Image (cartoon, grey):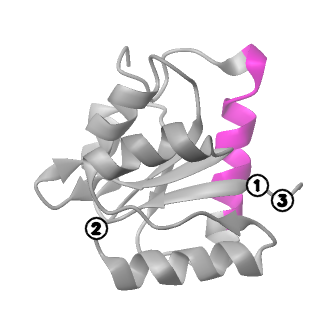
Amino acid sequence: MKALRILVVDDDAMLGMMLIEMLEDLGHEGLPLECTHRDAVAAAARHRPDLMLVDVGLGVDSGLAVMDEILPSRFIAHVFMSGNIDHLAALRPGAPVLRKPFDETQLEQAIRGALAQAAPDNRGPIGSAAA
C-alpha cells in the first residue's frame, strides 16, 4: 500500500496522538490531530487528505456530521471509529467502521477496506449523507 496522508479526528488527544503514531509506524503521514467538528472540516479543506479516520463521538459534536459536511463537496475515503459499532451500523449501513480499541493490523485492514470501497467504481452513497 502506498503511503497516505491521513487526517485523524478524535476528541481524545492522547488516543488521537497514539493513532497518528500507529499510522506513521505503518508508513503513512499523520496530519495534525483535529478534535472538533469545525476544525476537522477546515483541516480537510486545507490538507486534502487521502483518508480520514473519524471518531463518531466528538464530545458534543458528531463525526458523522463532520463527514456529512465534507462529502457533498469532495469525496474523501474515511473510516468511522467507535466503541459501539452496532449503533453506527444502524445509522450508516455499509460505512467503513473500526471498533475501538483496535491494533495496527485491524487499523491497516480498515484502511484497505475504506480504500477499496472508495474506488471510483464503488463510490456511492455509502457513508455519506445520502446513506
Residue at the disc numbered 2: 11
Of helix, strand and loop, which one carries label 2?
loop
For the residues labelled 2 and 3, the Cα–Cα distance comes to: 25 Å
Whether residue 76 appears in magenta in the rendering, the answer is no
Residue at x-position 27% and y-position 33%: 91
Magenta segment: 108-121
Q: Is residue 3 in view from this perspective?
A: yes
Residue 4: x %, y % from top left: 76, 55
Name the kind of residue labelled 3 in the image: Ala
> Magenta-highlighted stretch: main secondary structure?
helix
Residue 102: x %, y % from top left: 51, 75
Residue at x-position 33% and y-position 39%: 66
Give the camera-side residue of 112 and 24. 24
For the residues labelled 1 and 2, the Cα–Cα distance comes to: 22 Å
Residue 121: x %, y % from top left: 76, 15
Residue at the disc numbered 3: 3
Residue at the disc numbered 1: 4
For the residues labelled 1 and 3, the Cα–Cα distance comes to: 4 Å
Give the camera-side residue of 122 and 50. 50
